[in-house]
Image: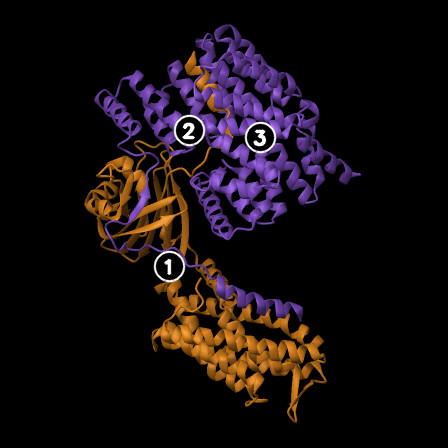
Amino acid sequence: MSRALALLLLLASFAAQAHKPSDSYLHLRIDGARVTGQWDIALRDLEQAIGLDTNGDGEITWGELRAHQADIAAYALARLSFAGDAKNCPLRVSGHEVDHHSDGAYEVLRFAADCGSAPVAIEVGYKLFFDFDAQHKGLLNLEYQGRIQSLVFTPEQSKQRFVLGEISAFRQFLSYGRDGVWHIWIGYDHILFLLSLLLPAVLLRQRRHWLPVARFADAFWDVFKIVTSFTVAHSITLSLAALGVISLPSRLVESAIAASVVLAALNNLLPLVGGRRWVVAFAFGLIHGFGFASVLTELGLPRDALVLALVGFNLGVEAGQLTIVAVFLPLAYFLRGTWFYRRVVLFGGSFAIVAVAMVWLLERSLNLKLISP
Amino acid sequence: MRRLLILVFVLICALGTRAAQAAPYTPRSDDEVLERLPFKASAAEGRELRQMRRALAEQPQNLERALALARRYFDLASAEGDPRYVGYAEATIRPWSNAAEPPVEILVMRALLRQYRHEFDAALGDLARAAERDPGNAEIWSWRSAILLVQADYTGAGAACAKLAPLASALLTTACTTIIDGRTGKSAQAYAELSKALARRPDADPDLKLWIETRLAEAALNLGRDELAERHFKTGLALGVTDGYILGAYADFLLDHGRPAEAVPMLKDWERSDILLLRLALAEQAAGLASAPAHIAMLNERFDASAMRGDKLHQQEEARFHLYLQGDAPGALRLAEENYRLQREPRDARILMESALAAKQLLAAQPALDWLRASGYEDPLYAKLAQRLKDGAK
């Protein structure tokens, strides 16, 4: 009877269930015949499965984890299978690290598999911890040709099959386009560079004074020239770098980009280059192209659809850029005659941009972290 | 123009807040502690658990051993709020629960585990099957009553208490009925009966006392006697029993009374629990503490992680998170509505009303208003919310 009573008491805490259940995070990257993987497995689950807390003090230290690395690798890899075109691809451990997820520390097991030849279809079998935890799930991210597919393994669904050819060329094109748009939107340095050049477009410099342009067409053509030359320039270097014709060290590229932002904004405060800002846009556009290329490389370029991805990404960058211009130009034109635009936006804005870009320049060139996250 | 300025401002701010992405690393020292286990493996609890696992491994066909271990895991899941143990328990009874006609004890155990995962209808189904074969099993009726209570089926819950009465002690029957009284406008009666029950049993174990103190506090709150409620919360907490429920309830009390700073020290070691982490973040934000953003980010990660696995266990908390920590009233309302279809406890109704008010979609709160009217639930705070909804609708 007291048993039932105790149970009834527990009911009260019904809604008070707390933590995250057990998950592991498996990331697989398929690159031709080669598969690389990263598998994050919770230490708490490994403790339950093979026991990590050697000295029994309720704490798992790096030393204890390190001592069990061979056991962990053997235990985990015996519960993961990877087959390309129905042929088993043997798994090999390539490293051990540690990471923290929202619910605690995880072993990071890095491994590689060799399938001999590039498979058309692959099958992943997962049965880690299913024997003792019916609620465990394996969350898989499969990366192929720069795209990521997510899938969940459960005790009921412990095998998943993928046909790699299923990612269509058009979808690939679209998704690189999206990445391009996204990159320009979150790439503050590119936006600030462009804005610095565009800010004076609705004004005219005469006898050391800024005057509003008379006609919208004047502002429009100025912006058109700047944006076009920036685009042409960065398309050239983006293509050359992505195709591997030229390669520059990323620290140099990133520092030069920061410097270009400083100079472009400085030019609004102490004008040197007046009407020919499109030349500046072209010259520095070449540098920014290398910056875009490094993003594209990080995304991973499909070997069989290189040009497609390149064009898609580049068009995405242009589309993103045009959206910014479309928001900027009417607003700036509308406000061009005000004191506010000349003093606060042009002068104050450029000043702020110089300050920010100087910090970038120092950080990137000296490899520092000045603005700590 | 202002948009441009705002853009520049946002860009500059964004620079400072580019959060460091977590990345795998190699710890520098062997002594670096990576993880603290929920209880010390050397403690009696861990030792006993290992013994039970070993005993079952020796005789994997032994139903009694499997049930004892599953029960132990379930108790741990409830006490620690850790769903891993539910997964362990499920795996332990799997050889039997997959059968076409599982033994009664397995059905009951499976019902417990299913209700934990909020599969209430499946759990009630298991209990009904078990009751057909073993109607004299008090545990079945007490669980049935509890699940129906969550679904706000007070008639059904009362009927289950009636089935329980001849099978159980007077105290258990009182517990079963007073909790329903507390939800149906009879809090004064519930308070009186529980006080009497507590007075009769000075020898009761701390678990039972804690349960009664919590119910007394809730009944007092319903009656608008906040000081009395706080006395019961404090007496309950002083018993020193690990219980997430009373911590959460008292934290809510402090938040409702504009005393967030007092909730922070009480909750600071409970980051592990989503439920209490939410209260901690709410309290820190209300008290203007610098630790709030980190805890908000942590909650965000937790909800993302559970979305990745497809879980919907904490929609009530997620709704509160969206409403009070993210300022996202429409998102909160969507979650609160979905949650209310599954769970209909007072707090589920409250968040539904609050997010409907914030999102200015007053009609969305109708199910909660219907429940409030039909049940006669007394808490004055709820009456005020309902009044604001009614005034707004005019």
Query: Chain B appears what colour?
Result: purple
**CA distance for labels 3 and 1:** 60 Å
Amino acid type, mark 2: Ala
Q: In which quarter of the image is residue A161?
A: top left
Figure chain in orange = A
Circle number at residue B79: 2
Q: Is mark 2 on a helix, strand or loop?
A: helix
User: The N terminus of chain A lies in which quarter of the figure?
Assistant: top left
Q: Mark 3, chain letter?
A: B
Q: Does residue B293 lie above or below B267 as drawn?
A: below
Amino acid type, mark 1: Gln
Q: Residues within 10 Å of mark 3 (few under 14, many from 20)?
A: many
**If you read the primary sequence from the N terminus, does the residue marked by circle 2 or circle 3 appear first?**
2
Q: Residue at x 46, y 67 (%)?
A: A313
Q: Residue at x 63, y 32 (%)?
A: B349
Residue on which disc 1 sits: A145
**CA distance for labels 2 and 3:** 23 Å
Residue on which disc 3 sits: B230
